[in-house]
């Protein structure tokens, strides 16, 4: 499963980049609003740091305007993927951008039918929002399962990008179901490595090694 960071925080992205595991970045207008820099600068900085797809969302709702704004966003860097909302206007713009080989990430997906339409419109990614479904009392993971089945039934190549991830269980379950990508807030990415038995085991290994009195070189 690919891992994207759901962030506009350049400091975090710079810090986590050396792990070699950041396959891409997703942004949205709410995340952009958290940055003290302008959106163009943020996008250019991110695209310099990360080679993989960087999703940049349009802020208009009419198909023609989404298409034009999408083309503009795509012109900012080679790895920009245009993020469009899952509406009929968005689907129309998606088809046009996809026909020009511009990658589209269809966002705000809350049903398997929406995901079916996005795939038919040529989306590169579909972003089901797991956490926001959980917030309603339903199970966001069921949607990931449904979309996986629909896409596998018909061989759609649109990648399932599990979004609105709120905890490490979401990540594990998305991977078990077979989501292609999970986009994580940086803190959730950092938490993936944590296990108390790892810490305990490491402490014991180092203690036992120290007791031998030997030195192991660090060339
Ligand atoms: O990128 C969109 C998505 O990940 C939003 O997450 O936590 O605001 O529902 P959240």
Image (spheres, rainbow, N blue to C red):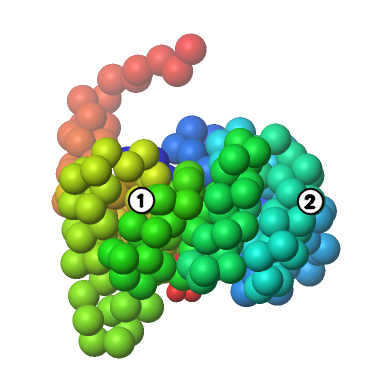
| Helix, strand or loop status at disc 1 | strand
* Residue 143 falls left or right of residue 186: left
Q: Is residue 62 above or below residue 211?
A: below
Pick the quarter of the image with the N terminus: top left
Task: Give x and y (percent) for residue 133.
Answer: 32, 78
Q: Is residue 27 visible?
A: no
The numbered mark at residue 72 is: 2
* Count of marks placed on residues: 2
User: Viewer-proximal residue, 66 or 20?
Assistant: 66
Q: Is residue 24 above or below residue 59?
A: above
Which residue is drawn at the image coordinates 32% and 84% (left, top)? 135
The numbered mark at residue 160 is: 1
Q: Is residue 185 above or below residue 3?
A: below
Q: Is mark 1 within 8 Å of ligand 1?
A: no
Which residue is drawn at the image coordinates 70% and 56% (left, top)? 67
* Residue 210 falls left or right of residue 107: left
Task: Give x and y (percent) for residue 16.
Answer: 53, 45
Q: Is residue 61 visible?
A: yes
Task: Give x and y (percent) for residue 184.
Answer: 43, 58
Instruction: Kindly indicate the quadrant of the structure image that contains residue 132.
Output: bottom left
Instruction: Kindly indicate the quadrant of the structure image that contains residue 62.
Output: bottom right
The numbered mark at residue 176 is: none
Q: Are marks 2 and 1 in contact (CB under 8 Å)?
A: no
* Residue 190 falls left or right of residue 130: right
Which residue is drawn at the image coordinates 35% and 17% (left, top)? 216
Which of label 2 and label 1 is nearer to you? Answer: 2
| Helix, strand or loop status at disc 2 | helix
Give the distance between the C-alpha atoms of the residues marked 2 and 1, in whole angstroms. Answer: 25 Å
What residue occupies the far bottom of the structure in this picture? 136
Q: Is mark 2 within 8 Å of ligand 1?
A: no
Q: Quick one: label 2, few (<14), some, or many (20+) residues within 10 Å?
A: few
């Amino acid at each position: 499963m690919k891992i994207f960071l759901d962030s506009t925080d350049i400091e975090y992205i710079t810090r986590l980049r050396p792990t070699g595991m950041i396959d891409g970045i997703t942004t949205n207008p709410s995340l952009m609003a958290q940055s003290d820099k302008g959106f163009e600068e943020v996008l250019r900085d991110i695209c310099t740091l990360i080679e993989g797809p960087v999703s940049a969302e349009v802020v208009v709702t009419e198909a023609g305007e989404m298409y034009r704004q999408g083309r503009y966003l795509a012109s900012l860097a080679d790895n920009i993927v245009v993020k469009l909302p899952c509406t009929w206007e968005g689907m129309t713009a998606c088809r046009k951008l996809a026909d020009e080989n511009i990658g589209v990430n269809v966002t705000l997906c809350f049903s398997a039918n929406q995901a079916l339409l996005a795939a038919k419109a040529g989306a590169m990614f579909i972003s089901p929002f797991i956490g926001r479904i959980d917030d309603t009392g339903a199970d966001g993971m069921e949607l990931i399962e449904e979309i996986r089945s629909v896409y596998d039934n018909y061989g759609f190549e649109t990648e399932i990008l599990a979004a609105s991830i709120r905890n490490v269980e979401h990540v594990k379950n998305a991977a078990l179901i077979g989501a292609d990508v999970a986009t994580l807030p940086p803190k959730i990415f950092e938490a993936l490595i944590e296990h108390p038995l790892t810490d305990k085991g490491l402490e014991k290994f180092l203690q036992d090694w120290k007791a031998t009195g030997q030195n192991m070189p660090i060339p």
